[in-house]
Image: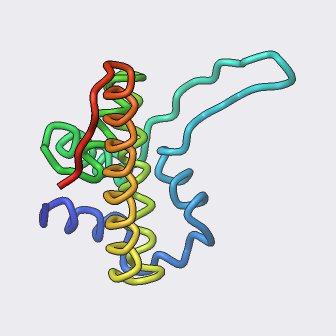
Amino acid sequence: TDYSLMRLTAELGNNIKQWPSIKNFVSWLGLAPGKHQSGKMNKRSKKKPATRAGQIFKQAAQSILLSKQPGLGAFARRLKAKKGSGIAIKATARKLAELYYRIFDKGMNYVEQGVKRYQEKLKEQQIIFLQKKAGELNLQVVEN
């Protein structure tokens, strides 16, 4: 929403170049996945709370999860079914933060092309899934 965008601008400012890469930006927000491993030993660490900007991205991700948006909404719902809502919200917030960074870095046209490509890929995956299921049930899929 516009209010979230205003809050993000207040927290982050207009200069996104203070973070050299998307990875640095996402890590600073507290949205990077944490994997503390040494050899085969998985270690636990104290969770650091996300920054205020990270919380804004998480709130936006939660509303996307509840919406019927095809691109990021479908991604969030698929992840929620596999891993749970907490992980889905954080992963979607990370994707939103990456899109936000790319808008300021590369421009809006670049981001819109990526979203269209993602939606096409999702549609292709659904078609392949339906053809596979139809084959298992000895049915035939006819395209219009």
| Residue occupying image coordinates x 31% and y 28% | 134
Q: Quadrant of the N terminus?
A: bottom left
| Residue occupying image coordinates x 17% and y 50% | 69
Residue 59 in sight from this viewpoint: no
Picture coordinates of residue 124 (x, y %)?
Answer: 37, 51
Picture coordinates of residue 36 (x, y %)?
Answer: 71, 28
Residue 114 vertical placement versus 35 (above, below): below
Picture coordinates of residue 112 (x, y %)?
Answer: 32, 73
Residue 116 in sight from this viewpoint: yes
Res 113 quadrant in image: bottom left
Of residues 91 and 55, the one nearer the viewer is 91
Of residues 88 and 131, the one nearer the viewer is 131
| Residue occupying image coordinates x 58% and y 24% | 46
Picture coordinates of residue 92 (x, y %)?
Answer: 36, 45
Res 121 quadrant in image: bottom left
Of residues 12 and 136, the one nearer the viewer is 136
Question: How many numbered dots are placed on residues in this image?
Answer: 0
| Residue occupying image coordinates x 28% and y 50% | 56
Q: Quadrant of the C terminus?
A: bottom left
Residue 38 vertical placement versus 126 (above, below): above
Res 101 quadrant in image: bottom left
Residue 123 vertical placement versus 3 (above, below): above
